Image (cartoon, rainbow, N blue to C red):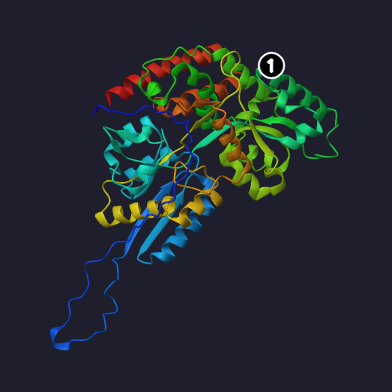
Amino acid sequence: MKKNYGFKMFTVIALVMAMLVSIVGCSSSQNDTKKDDKENVSNEQPKDSNKKSDVTIELFQFKLEIAKALDEAVAEYMEENPNVKINVQSIGEGYSVQLKAKMQSGKEPTIFNVGGPSDVNDWSYKLEDLSDQPWVQHAAVGTLGGVTIDDKVYGLPYSVEGYGFVYNKAMFEAADVDVSAIKDFATLEAAVKELDGKIKSGELKEQFPDLEAVFELPAKETWLTGQHTTNIALSPELGSALNAFNAKKIDYKYSDQLKKIVDLQANYSSDADNKQKLCAVDNTTSVENGIAIGRVAMVQQGNWIYPSVNNVDQEIAQQLDILPIPLEGVIEDSIPIGVPMYWTVNVDASDEQKKAAKDFLNWLYQSEKGKEIIVNEFFFIPPFTNYEGLEAKDCLSRAVQRYTNEEKTMPWVFMGYPSGWCMDIMGTSIQKYLAGVQDWDEAIEYCKEQWEELAKDNAEN
């Protein structure tokens, strides 16, 4: 059934880091105190007078990078709240598909994740209204637009994230390539060619013995190519996730510039001579077995990879920074910034489960202990304004903040793509292009046609 959604404008840019300290009290008293036995009056209270009812909730989340830290946070919360048991499942790739399967299995999670307008449209019948939660008043400007319907808030923002070309500063310095001179696509391409030449000549072999290519392109990850790469071209065309959600068709007027971005990564990757192999390169190969071990100098990724790289090599993690992915002649100095996902509560869970779920989310994002975990264990840029004194410590989050402070950002519009378009259509079309079974113009025309079909289907559902 089609609904009339009043989404607020999705402008996730302003990171207001002027923090206020607040303390969220989430205690509640129990009403199950035993009545005094009038025949055995005693000043001693019954041992179980304050015992809370046991409750078990299921948490189903998508972000593998924080899986270990989340498990530890949950363990700490359960120690403080022994009546609450939280079972955590961290999924990663294929989260949307597995969430649908989970819902259909009858074992519905209490807490789960949704993205922007498209996800909210798909799951609106499962979302608890969270408008009365204490964290809502502290949400940073623009971070709730993707989950607000008719002035009701249905999701807690995970974090603020940004992405671009994550690169190893030490490798560029060793190759005497001046990163500060990279201002646009032309200067980026020139720098890549210079670095590639020095890698192939063996000039950097002694200092970086495992370095084999400038880029790694994990084309197997259709979320990365279909969502993040295409966002570079469609963000200036569509302007916001809400506009993308409402777009019946796209012109793809910057598709030629998008092709150059894809080609640059493929042509200077370790599989440049056989690009079909890029379709088998996954996220782990590009991050933990790529930039984290010094095998490549640059990957298209965001600040969320810092924990993964840091777990492999702390010295390399400290060398990372972010360059914009330049859309030639359009936007060449900015990085896309947005909210990756939202925590939601299942409206069909029991009242006890919903209360426990809300209490846990408040503890995680608004208690002093939780704030420390968010910034220092999850390495998140907090999407709230009351984190005074807890600025991001990792270099990639600081890079995102730097671009934000310089107002060199663009919005994430992929959250508004028609369901199924970015990964199943666009991501696979880029794979076919790299494999040589479809040329670029054919791929773009096919993706434009499929956008119209899927947008029509979504509007009718």
Q: Is residue 221 left or right of residue 184?
A: left
Residue in the image at 67% along x and 48% along y: 312
Q: Is residue 272 left or right of residue 442?
A: right
Residue in the image at 64% along x and 44% along y: 309
Q: Which of 110 and 129 lies nearest the eye of the viewer? A: 129
Q: Which of 168 and 56 lies nearest the eye of the viewer? A: 168
Residue 182 screen position, x and y as percent: 69, 23
Instruction: Report the number of numbered marks.
Output: 1
Residue in the image at 38% along x and 52% along y: 362
Q: Residue most toward the bottom?
A: 40
Residue 169 screen position, x and y as percent: 72, 35
Quadrant of the image occupied by residue 257: top right
Q: Dot 1 lies on which element? A: helix
The answer to whether 272 is drawn above or below residue 204 in the figure is: above
Q: Residue most toward the left?
A: 38
Q: Is residue 345 left or right of residue 170?
A: left
**Residue identifier under label 1:** 186
The answer to whether 282 is drawn above or below residue 52 in the figure is: above
